[in-house]
Image: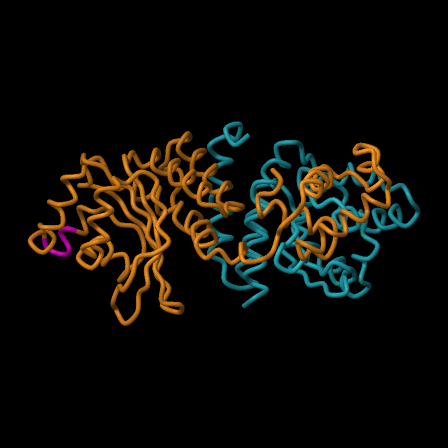
Amino acid sequence: MINSFSKTEIVGIMETIEAAHYCANEAGFKAVLQKAAYLLDAQYSVCGVGSSNLSRVSSVNGSYPKEWFDAYVAERLYLYDPVVRYQMNFPSTVNWRNISRHCADEESRAFFARASAYGLVNGLSSGVYNHADGALSIFSFAGGSGRFDARNKKILETIAPHLNIALSRLRTI
Amino acid sequence: MDYNRFAKQDLAAMLEIIQSSIACNTEDGVKGLMDKTRILVCADYSISGFGDWRNNRLSLIKNIINLNYPVEWMKIYNQLKLYEKDPIIWRQAAEGGVHLWTETYKLFGEKTSKDFIVRASDFGIKHGVSGGITSAADGTMSIMTFSGPKERFKQYHRAILNVLLPHVNQALTRTCMGALRERNFRLTAREYEILKWMKDGKTNWEISSILNISERTAKFHVQNIEHKLNAVNRPHAVAIAYEMGFVH
């Protein structure tokens, strides 16, 4: 799989992994998210980490529209977010298109419609479980070219564990 | 780090090692990482380990993972406590980081190290590149060494080890400290089988159909697995199982 990446892609992945490895605070982690967004050709980036029942949730906004991010946190929209609900059951790297196909209920449709008003139509998310405390981390990238093909998915699959290690480290500082 | 300086195939190999390091927590796994790194830095031999480093004194080398260092040499090295005279160890303990041996010998003065160098070179260990991380907080130092009889270790190889060291070191630490192994993870053969299906995303009903057991029994096994792995739920159990190498 790695051999199918171009040299430019591998260099970008290595730079992102290095940035994740050495980031020491939230500002540094935001920069890592933005670097990852650039690599994935995405406009927006965000990540969140929640306990198994979502009673405790925290997030870092790389570059999501502020108005949407604030509403998401204030209204606890993660409780209704189909991406979060999907990741709670099947932590993996998925294209939002595949989730929206499986979430045809009213609540999910309303959520996707509301998000799309902020340009959040196409995206990729990666969920990683933390064995130490059972918390779930989700890294989301959206907008930009909006293609998010299998190649982008492979890149996110490669860097997501490193983003998660960095996030876990920051949570303990 | 300027990654563009590396050849594409070396970059791909480095990324593969980094990815393998994430979940590595066994001695065989670490040996695999060391071997791949050894090939990348053009070395013949490799060894890694931990030492107690307190008050600027190295008191003990422990948790050694020997990929293929000559056993005879290691016997002499340990019996005569040569780590107390080894300039490579001393520099690693004092500075951490990654260093070419030729530079270290110069730094310590070749006269001081001459006896040691001559002894080691009798076993084909003359040149090399070593990396390590020293933690003042817990008084430990790790070291990873790649060596051979010929002088072919260049700044390029040093740069490769510099990239890989933090990742391989984490795997080494995880393995040697063995914190995870202290937990009681004894699963039955049936539970291993069910865990494999859980990993594939099967529901209790699907597992019961596959294994020809009742759904209630499947649920019972799943709960036992979650309990034994100290998992808060099903995906968490699968994540721990991955971490422990129970599923692949």
Residue at screen point 29% across, 42% down: B146
Residue at screen point 80% across, 47% down: A116
First to last magenta residue range: B105-109
Q: Nearer the viewer, residue B105 or B246?
A: B246
The picture's colour for chain A is: cyan
Q: Quadrant of the C terminus of chain A?
A: bottom right
Q: Nearer the viewer, residue A37 or B246?
A: B246
Q: Position of residue A101 (x, y in %)?
A: 84, 37
Q: Nearer the viewer, residue B248 or B90?
A: B248
Q: Position of residue A36 (x, y in %)?
A: 57, 46
Q: Quadrant of residue B28?
A: top left
Query: Magenta includes A20?
Result: no
Q: Position of residue B241 (x, y in %)?
A: 63, 46
Residue at screen point 34% across, 37% down: B38
The answer to whether residue B189 is left or right of residue B73 is: right
Note the chain letter of the orange one: B
